[in-house]
Amino acid sequence: MIEIKDLHKHYDTAQGRIEVLKGIDLSVPEGSITAVVGPSGAGKSTLSHCISLLEKPSSGQILIDGKDLGALSGRALRAERRAIGTIFQNSALLSRLSVAENVALPLRNLGVVHHEMQQRVAQLLDRVGLLEKADAYPGQLSGGQRQRVGIARALALRPRLLLSDEATSGLDPESTHQVLGLLDSLRSDLGLSIILITHEMDVVRHVADEVAQLASGRIAEHGALHELVASPGSATGEKLLPLRSEELPAGFDYAVTVAYRKDRVDPGWISRLGIEHGIAVALLGGAVEAHHEGTLGRVRLGVQGATPQDLLRLLDGWGLQADPGSLARNNHELVEANA
Ligand SMILES: Nc1ncnc2c1ncn2[C@@H]1O[C@H](COP(=O)(O)OP(=O)(O)OP(=O)(O)O)[C@@H](O)[C@H]1O
């Protein structure tokens, strides 16, 4: 379990002090993946560098299994930083070393004896599906294969946290899929805590359990991915499962956004609105996405024949979440839920 508590980071420059991280609180349980997303300049790289101990936080704590890494130095810090394995965007392999030698590097630095090292490297390469590439050089591998070697190297010292810093940026969809599949299995098989720093919402949607939205050095929104997506008013949910919606057609009173988890609702809920309650519904837009915890959906509906208040109450009773803030007579004019 990793816990980040009230983490601050500032830089003193010739132009004055720049506050980059302004009090980050984040915890990632064992066996789960938390994605940290946010626009350019939000502080993602700075946070990543603080977690991987490349940068010293200005204040706050980074606790791994209760131990504050920021309070350590010298030998104790070197020992504890093994708890964190990092994978980088460009895989950061040494081109003059073979795949096996790259993976062995952290073990060699630690003075692990030769035959043990060979055994462990073979295990690690097998784990990432690249045992047959042990003697190849990074230049002979695809981008996705290099990244998997990077993961094998990051796992060499049996970390408890894997930090992935834009590790799939620039990979083709197939390689991205393989890397994410690997992270997914590491989460479940090894019970690793994984922090995924990324700007790719497709990646987040695919594997994350939780999502933290970073904005101007603060966590603006944080929650379970399926809850954010199923919460129609969530800005992060909207980015994860965007809706492109048509204008409300003539004859309909207002539009509303409804979110749901497929396994928790009656699949016939839209037709039941008409059949059981005489409410006319027009489908203006929708997105359905498979997630490892179950399929998530968001739809935008045009409605005629029920007050917003009655409709929200009805949907709520069926386990559907409708956002009062999404009620609108057209794409601009909002409707009060209790009107
Ligand atoms: N060493 C530094 N000195 C001064 N300012 C810095 C330093 N490092 C980062 N910053 C500033 O901190 C802010 C956040 O930068 P950071 O690279 O962490 O953002 P980011 O979310 O990773 O952005 P991107 O997605 O574009 O990589 C930026 O305004 C940047 O200029």
Image (cartoon, grey):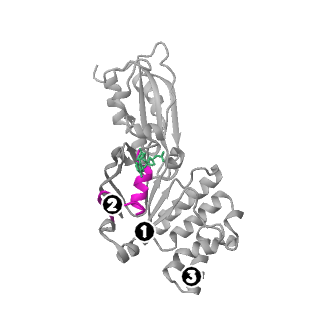
Range drawn in magenta? 42-63
- Magenta span includes 47: yes
Q: CA distance from mark 1 to mark 2?
A: 12 Å
Residue 105: x %, y % from top left: 56, 75
Q: Which residue is mark 3?
A: 117
Q: Earlier in the sequence, mark 2 or mark 3?
A: 2
Residue at 50 percent of width and 16 percent of height: 249
Residue 196: x %, y % from top left: 47, 55
Where's the N terminus, which quadrant?
Answer: bottom left
Q: Earlier in the sequence, mark 1 or mark 3?
A: 3
Query: In the image, is 66 to the left or to the right of 43?
Result: left
Secondary structure under tag 3 reads helix
- Please say whether residue 174 is visible from this viewpoint: yes
Q: Quadrant of the rendered structure where residue 123 is?
A: bottom right
Name the kind of residue labelled 3 in the image: Met
Q: CA distance from mark 2 to mark 3?
A: 31 Å
Instruction: Indicate if the residue with disc 2 has its beta carbon within 8 Å of ligand 1.
Output: no
- Magenta span includes 162: no
Name the kind of residue labelled 2 in the image: Glu
Name the kind of residue labelled 1 in the image: Arg
The disc placed on residue 160 is: 1
- Please say whether residue 209 is visible from this viewpoint: no
Residue at 27 percent of width and 23 percent of height: 338
Q: Which residue is mark 2?
A: 3
Q: Quadrant of the rendered structure where residue 324 is?
A: top left
Q: Quadrant of the rendered structure where residue 74 is?
A: bottom left
